[in-house]
Image (spheres, rainbow, N blue to C red):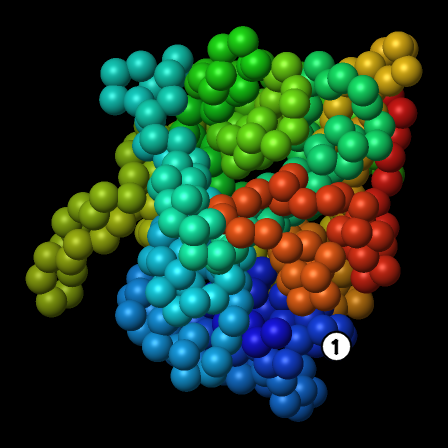
Amino acid sequence: MRVLLVGAGGVGTAITRIAARRPFFEAMVVADYDPARAEAAVAALDGDERFHAERVDASDEAAVTALLARHRCDVLLNATDPRFVMPLFHAARAGGARYVDMAMSLSRPHPERPYEECGVRLGDAQFAEADEWAEAGALALVGMGVEPGLSDVFARYAADELFDEIEEIGVRDGANLTVEGHDFAPSFSIWTTIEECLNPPVVYEADRGWFTTEPFSEPEVFDFPEGIGPVECVNVEHEEVLLVPRWVKARRVTFKYGLGGEFVETLKTLHRLGLDRTAPVTVPGEQGPVSVSPRDVVAACLPDPATLGELMHGKTCAGTWVRGVKDGAPREVYLYHVVDNQWSMAEYGSQAVVWQTAVNPVVALELLAGGAWSGVGVLGPEAFPARPFLDLLTEYGSPWGLREQ
């Protein structure tokens, strides 16, 4: 396997550090718009000759396709933000490579009823091309991070091994992470966080299909394991709700994020001020008017999440809560994966949230390389058997847990 990794930010860099310990691939080209980031990621790997740094503009489909050909890469792993999903998705197809991402093509709210009906849903643009990929015998594995990704694997595992009937699948994400010296310092891309938190959340119900609600709706307190404890969680737009029902039968699917009141109020303030917008606005500059995206300005004013590891303390938990019936009796479980920031920093030099995101696509690549996972078309993680993934994740030194509720 020869991999083109596009994106050398926090998650991309963590991917290289995790992959460097595994023998399943022949080469990994690390490409970024900023060549210094790609070079730094490769330089940190103690001379591992399988890694090579390149510069590429992720929005330039032709340039990415040419890079795939030049390095004879048969997989494109997308570690950029969701703005670049479609050009990279198309570049992989044009270059004859398998495609893997950790998020999906962007949504657009319904123009008239945004908090009741879906407009363009997450992943719609990719699934619209599923037949073309399948007819070509090509594979796009979409949503293969931690959430979406591991959370979807948990849903498939629950359906296969833990339940006869499933009433509800609810992804629940929470943490007790703190960042020294910062009142507001998101542990993941603020661009992506704004996108998913301020868009209308999507809910799935079997008798209704997909529909939307108000942002931050249906608050609930969820008790997270391994000392994290109770955290208030709210509805947030997320890919799992669009992926899980395609392959796993459940009467209801939700995603709720433990954001905390202060974080929610900050996001609401950004929205009130229009600072969540991606469309450029014109501002004065030293050499004349400059066109900038307000959301890009917000991101530039906040610390890079990849640099926060030394200042972070605590744990992050990603998991899937499932309620249903097994052998005629009610059952309720929480399948989860916890990463302690102190451990991930000491072991890999990567903060917990980006490391937890990064480990899952590497596990998936190894399963694809070995043939334990295979398929054609545009597929989510729940389209594949869960047990090989969970066993290999444990082999990577990062076990998962199951709690009876």
Residue at the outermost front position: 135
Q: Is residue 317 visible?
A: no
Identify the image quadrant of residue 130. top left
Identify the residue at horizontal 89%, vertical 25% (top origin): 404
Question: Looking at the image, which is closer to me, 297 or 158?
Answer: 158
Circle 1 packing at 10 Å, graded few (<14), some (14-19), many (20+), is: few
Measured from the top left, where is residue 265 in percent x and y? 49, 27
Identify the image quadrant of residue 41. bottom right
Identify the residue at horizontal 47%, vertical 83% (top origin): 71
Q: Give the amino acid type for the residue marked by disc 1 in the picture.
A: Pro
Vertical placement of 170 versus 60: above or below?
above
Question: Looking at the image, which is closer to me, 81 or 124?
Answer: 124
Measured from the top left, where is residue 277 in percent x and y? 29, 39
Which quarter of the image is occupied by the N terminus?
Answer: bottom right
* 366 left or right, relative to 79: right
Identify the residue at horizontal 51%, vertical 62% (top origin): 98
* 66 left or right, relative to 286: right
Which quarter of the image is occupied by the C terminus?
Answer: top right
Question: Looking at the image, which is closer to me, 147 or 137?
Answer: 137
* 37 left or right, relative to 322: left
Measured from the top left, where is residue 312 in percent x and y? 69, 53
Vertical placement of 158 versus 110: above or below?
below
Q: Identify the residue position indicated by label 1 in the image.
A: 23
Vertical placement of 162 versus 93: above or below?
above
